[in-house]
Amino acid sequence: MKKYVLTLSCILLSIQTWAQEPIKVNQLGYYPEGEKVAVVPGGATGSFQVLDAQTNKVVYTGTLKSPQNWEHSGEEVALADFSDFSDTGSYKLMHPGAGSSYIFEIKDDVHHELAKSAIRALYYNRVSTGLESQHAGKWARMAGHPDDNVFVHASAASKERPEGYVISSPKGWYDAGDYNKYIVNSGISTYTLLAAYEHYPEYYGDLSLNIPESGNDVPDLLDEARWNIDWMLTMQDPNDGGVYHKLTTLNFEGVLMPDEAVNDRYVVMKTTSAALNFAAVMATSARTYAEYDPEFARECLKAAEYAWQWAVKNPEQLYRQPEDVQTGAYGDRSVDDEFDWAAAELYISTQNDDYWNARDFQETEFRTPSWSYVRPLAWISLAHHIWDLTEAADKDLIRSQIIGHGDMLKQGYQSSAYGISMGQSGRDFVWGSNGMAGNQSLMLIQAYRLTGDDSYMQAALSNLDYVLGRNPTGYSYVTGLGSFPPMNPHHRPSEADEANSEPVPGFVVGGPQNGHQDNCEVYPSDYPASSFLDDWCSYSTNEVTINWNAPWIYTSGAMEYYFKD
Ligand code: G3I
Ligand code: 9MR
């Protein structure tokens, strides 16, 4: 978007923080059979009304719960629960003192659009290909980054592939608002898509995404994931099984379209975390592609085992950013969780007890997964396959890890002033807090899958409301969706596109947190859940990434599957 928009938004910022309706709802809406909760600010009490959006007639009257302080935003908020109203239609919520909400719907497939466009966002971030208007509409663009001439960086040099050696490593997704490709972050992101398919094959079997591969005999979700998996495979050195940590320019590119960003690209350092993320994704791919492309599935499994063997021989190759490289690090100080995850996926796919026995699986703290903490992904896959596992696996441990985690998050949802699990732990409002909220929903859904207890589903749904508008800033944090979405995400193809005022749709932006680790001069608030800026400058709250979209892909797809008629 153009410079003057930026200046204008800075001026507006000094006048008011956010322009929006005061009562916070899920701006897409609610399922007829799901919980329906809005948040009313300003210490409001008394009754609230739901109005038909067309006729303005009152269709429901309820009483607000007592207002509570939410420590993460400093607000006094009251919950308006209208779950027992289930007539489909378009509505808004009103309170005489507090005002109104945006219009929302009650309908059966209320998150269908999110389920689709959050996957299509990854298509828009495809590397090495042009986007045609028949698939990309007004966001069609030229191809960028063929990545067929990538240099081996000094940090990655080996006997067979010395510094300056050229490899071809095309395709993949741009990680985020930058143009680089990182194996670690591809790990959790790609896995989450594959898990969505593995858990809900009926739903994704029918979901058509209007991508170039649509209409072939493979589910579109698997076609999209394959674009990134094909790239990941090229990041393995065939000479030893090791995997490069990232493929990157030395510095971040400027605000340019992909085809204009032409600095040299390098593969940098082989690391243990890259090898293990790679092994876990390839072992999962071996299962999910077996039906559609058995030869590819076998290739993936072979690559997974080769990477695992490298990691076992090189267990402490932690990423160290070379002096001449400034781009994202995805550095991790501990790879125990990556070892557990890769071992679990290999164990499931091979049924070879050696992989289970290679690790001392035991009780660990209930921490929501992220790019740097992947152990819960092991529990997710093990729980899904619990009936097919060999005697070696400790099934009680697997169950208790998933259910214990779900219970912890559900408790947060039951006690929070906003009625959401987000904010339960002091660690929730980090860089990428919206990804955290999505991964909490993902974990809650796993507890539901093991127990059938509906309360986990409702808790998972509450975070979906949160990300779509039931939050202190009032944004629907997904580009192109809802009444008040971000317009200026830190995303180069959106920012550099002079012709388009609307950003590429379907991206979940990072979300509020108060680290303020960027170049923005003013943030509207220091409270973690309110510290968000819809401005290009705010890469610490308003960037997009594949790993923040992934859990929302899973969660919205799962909800559509469970709440369908
Ligand atoms: O691990 C500590 C934790 O112990 C502590 O309690 C917490 C308090 O803030 O900080 C944690 O570290 C944070 C770390 O992420 C792990 O979550 C850092 O503060 C935080 O600055 C760091 O942010 C990462 C950011 O890069 C900067 O390195 C984000 O997770 C990560 O998503 C982001 O990734 C970038 C890529 O490098 C490049 N591409 C874009 C992408 C998204 O911005
Ligand atoms: O655009 C970059 C973004 O993808 C990263 O997440 C972020 C943190 O590593 O860095 C951004 O690039 C900024 C760079 O770090 C400092 N100069 C300004 C760049 C953005 O305009």
Image (spheres, grey):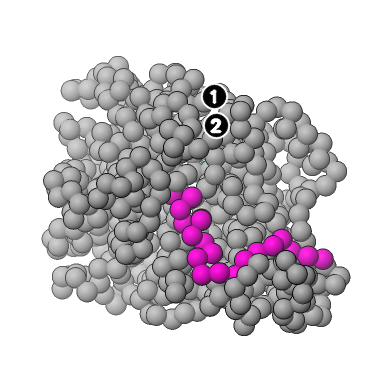
Tag 1 residue: 256
Q: Nearer the viewer, residue 225 or 254?
A: 225
Label 1 crowd bin: few (<14), some (14–19), many (20+), radius 10 Å: some
Residue 516 appears left or right of 522 = left
Please indicate, yes or no, whether residue 25 appears anywhere in the rendered image: yes
The Cα–Cα distance between marks 1 and 2, rounded to whole angstroms, is: 6 Å
Q: Which mark is residue 492?
A: 2
Please indicate, yes or no, whether residue 268 appears anywhere in the rendered image: no
Q: Is residue 29 above or below residue 230?
A: below
Label 2 crowd bin: few (<14), some (14–19), many (20+), radius 10 Å: many
Residue 217: where, in percent of width, then height? Answer: 25, 50
Is there a contact, CB below 8 Å, between mark 1 and mark 2?
yes
Type of the residue with mark 1: Leu
Say if the magenta span includes residue 101: yes
- Residue at x 53% of width, y 32% of height: 493
Q: Is residue 75 above or below residue 228?
A: below
Q: Is mark 2 within 8 Å of ligand 2?
A: yes
State the extent of the magenta-drawn residues as a range.
99-119
Q: Nearer the viewer, residue 502 or 313?
A: 502
Residue 165: where, in percent of width, then height? Answer: 26, 18
